[in-house]
Image (spheres, rainbow, N blue to C red):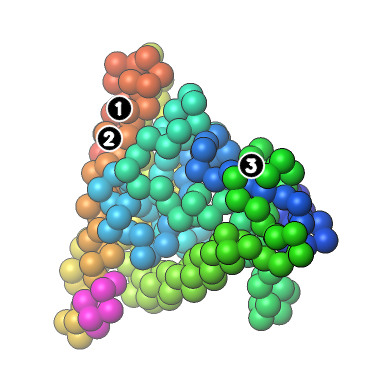
């Protein structure tokens, strides 16, 4: 496959014929994510991610996906240091799942577990966790990754239901963030959506009650509170690059 899903270079189906002697070391480095400035987030992760990340919604007029902002510029991740270590308390499941991923069939009914063969910590020397045993059967480790991918897919479907609810009630509005970089240059992030606090408060009582019952209201406010993390993130990136300030030029997130 061609490069897909931002961090995957060559994802192919896992098979005992092709990967029987393969092992993998996970969690040693997140260097594979150093050039992505945002990654998808599951609704189930909002409360864990909101204290440290800015949660927005990326997509278009038809479909949106919750996303965490990781950098101010393209190919910049302020949460991966020079040694490839993740520097935030929480790691999004999208990154913890790597180098595995599900591939969906054209009819959407079948999912196949794939792996990115370009991941640098695959090996045939027995280092880390084996994918298959000597008889070609899946190891407990591979079964655990299969189960994790299944759970991720199920939670992704639930996340899409939440996003459709937001679209249904017209709660999303286009937004952008402006930054002043070290040296005085200005840059901006655009192409994302945020929830309108005013529209949320104006929903009919029965709709708010239903969203409270399903915990969707809690997710909305977790997202809104997370927008305050944009300035600390910018300052952290500026400090890491030797700058003295990198706060937004105006509001942290402004609607457009």
Q: Secondary structure at mark 3?
A: loop
Residue 214 drawn in magenta: yes
Number of other residues with Cα within 10 Å of mark 2, as a class: few under 14, some 14 to 19, many 20 or more: some
Residues at discs 3 and 1 in contact (Cβ within 8 Å) = no
User: In what element is the residue under mark 1?
Assistant: helix
> Circles 1 and 2: CB distance less than 8 Å?
yes
Main SS, magenta residues:
helix
Q: Is residue 228 magenta?
A: no
The furthest residue to the front? 134
- For this orientation, the residue located farthest to the bottom is 206
> In this rendering, would 98 be left or right of 192?
right
Tell me the number on the disc at residue 231: 2
Give the image location of residue 7, x and y in percent.
60, 45
Q: Range of the magenta residues?
A: 210-216
Q: Nearer the viewer, mark 3 or mark 2?
A: 3
Residue at left offset 46%, top offset 55%: 93
At horizontal 60% and vertical 50% (from top left) the residue drawn is 129
Per the rendering, the mark at residue 235 is 1
Structural distance between the alpha carbons of marks 3 and 2: 41 Å
Residue 63: horizontal and vertical position, in percent?
51, 66
Please tell me which residue lies in front, 222 or 115. 115
User: Where 46 falls versus 230 (above or below)?
Assistant: below
């Amino acid at each position: 496959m061609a490069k897909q899903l931002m961090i995957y270079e060559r994802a192919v189906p896992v098979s005992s014929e092709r990967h029987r002697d393969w092992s993998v070391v996970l969690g040693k480095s997140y260097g594979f994510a150093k050039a992505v400035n945002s990654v998808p987030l599951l609704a189930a992760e909002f409360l864990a991610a909101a204290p440290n990340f800015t949660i927005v919604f990326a997509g278009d007029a038809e479909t949106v996906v919750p996303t965490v902002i990781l950098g101010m510029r393209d190919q910049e991740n302020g949460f991966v240091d020079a040694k490839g270590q993740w520097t935030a308390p929480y790691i999004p499941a999208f990154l913890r799942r790597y180098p595995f991923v599900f591939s969906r069939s054209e009819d959407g009914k079948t999912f196949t577990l794939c792996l990115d063969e370009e991941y640098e910590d695959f090996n045939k020397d027995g280092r880390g966790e084996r994918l298959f045993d000597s008889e070609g059967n899946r190891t407990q480790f591979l079964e655990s990754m299969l189960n994790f991918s299944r759970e991720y897919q199920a939670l992704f479907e639930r996340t899409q239901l939440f996003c459709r609810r937001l679209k249904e009630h017209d709660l999303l509005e286009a937004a952008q963030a402006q930054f002043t970089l070290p040296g005085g240059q200005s840059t901006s992030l655009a192409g994302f959506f945020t929830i309108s606090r005013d529209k949320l408060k104006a929903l009919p009582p029965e709709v708010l009650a239903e969203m409270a019952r399903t915990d969707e209201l809690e997710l909305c406010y977790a997202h809104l509170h997370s927008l305050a993390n944009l300035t600390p993130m910018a300052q952290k990136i500026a400090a890491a690059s030797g700058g003295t300030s990198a706060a937004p030029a105006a509001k942290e997130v402004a609607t457009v």
